[in-house]
Amino acid sequence: MIIGLDLGTTSISAVLFHPERRVVTASVECANDAGITGLAEGRHEQRAATISATACGLVASLLQQSGVPPGRIAGFALTGQQHGLVVVDTGLNPLTNLITWRDQRTATVPAGLRKHLYGAKTGCFLHPGYGGLTLHHLIRQGELPKGAYKVLPITGFLAARLTGCCAIDETMAASWGILDVQSRCWHQPLLKLLDIPEQLLPEVVTSCSPLGPVVHSQATGLAPQTIVFNPAGDNQAGFAGVGDLGGQEAVVNLGTSAQISVFSPWYSLSPELETRPFPGGGFLRVYAALCGGWAYA
């Protein structure tokens, strides 16, 4: 059986999935209460360690409630909120909070930098809250912590804590706005423009591919042989869950972000949309409102 975990901005949920029968046999959910209060106006951060601990406890609860022996769990799949990042040291301890996609500290970055010349390669421009712009800001302001080893999305942070492997897939990497989405590797000219050292970035590993077995259970209750799969972005994962890749359907998500997504087998870009990599090939053409969280609040 497979466990799937979603690290959302406002909630965290997990399901137990039977791949042969293609049914969810159990599910659990809880609020994401890791938010930091008292921050400067426009900033939005969450405690990465709290999210990790909450998620691990939720997985343990799912196993306990289902009564399924941990040895029957063959794989652990992850998805979650995109664009945000957390800085870690060599011991994979967080040196910063998770700076989420809702963070607006980069809103004053010159428009010429945000609307760079490489949008046709990256599939998007650099909006406030996007990891590439956030990392540029930390470096430019001298706020990158001493001992910084890697920057990771929150899903990559949990996967690294479980496996010891620092990686990012093409969907999460693209959400930072600094990936060449066709070659699916970091966009070198843009990294140079933003003064981002490539050694800070995790290796880009194919979406949903095995990262390795659990080596640190982190109180999940997972057995050591359980394979952890490279996390995919929640926009792509949500589309895969309900979309027909052979048809012309659009998927409308009224979650914390709010998006309209359409699958395309080929790459194209228009100013009003983002073109995001899709696991297994192809792309999603996405209109992301990025305001659902504030609307709900």
Image (spheres, rainbow, N blue to C red):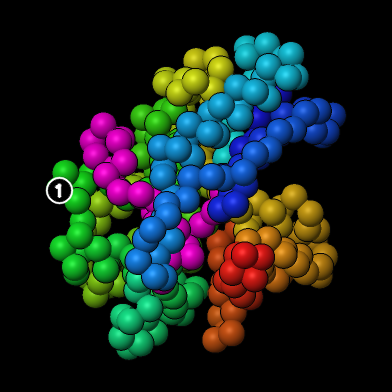
Spot occupied by residue 22 in the image (x, y as percentages of width and height): 82, 34
Q: Nearer the viewer, residue 49 or 268?
A: 49
| Residue pictured at 59% horizontal, 69% vertical | 294
Neighbourhood count class around disc 1 (C-alpha, 10 Å): few under 14, some 14–19, many 20 upward: few
Q: Which of 204 and 130 is in front in this view?
A: 130
In the image, is residue 293 part of the stretch drawn in magenta?
Answer: no
268 is higher (above) or lower (below) than 203:
below
| Residue pictured at 40% horizontal, 65% vertical | 43
191 is higher (above) or lower (below) than 240:
below
- The residue tagged 1 is 146
Image quadrant containing the C terminus: bottom right
In the image: residue 251, left or right of residue 134: right
In the image, is residue 85 part of the stretch drawn in magenta?
Answer: yes
Q: Which of 143 and 185 is in front in this view?
A: 143
| Residue pictured at 68% horizontal, 38% vertical | 29
Three-letter amino acid code at the position of disc 1: Lys
255 is higher (above) or lower (below) than 50:
below
Q: Which residue lies furthest to the front in this view?
A: 38
Spot occupied by residue 269 in the image (x, y as percentages of width and height): 56, 80
Asked if residue 82 shows in the view, the reply is yes
Secondary structure type for disc 1: loop
| Extent of the magenta region | 79-104
Spot occupied by residue 236 in the image (x, y as percentages of width and height): 63, 56
Asked if residue 168 shows in the view, the reply is no
In the image: residue 63, left or right of residue 155: right
How many numbered marks does the figure carry?
A: 1
- Magenta span main SS: loop
In the image: residue 184, left or right of residue 279: left
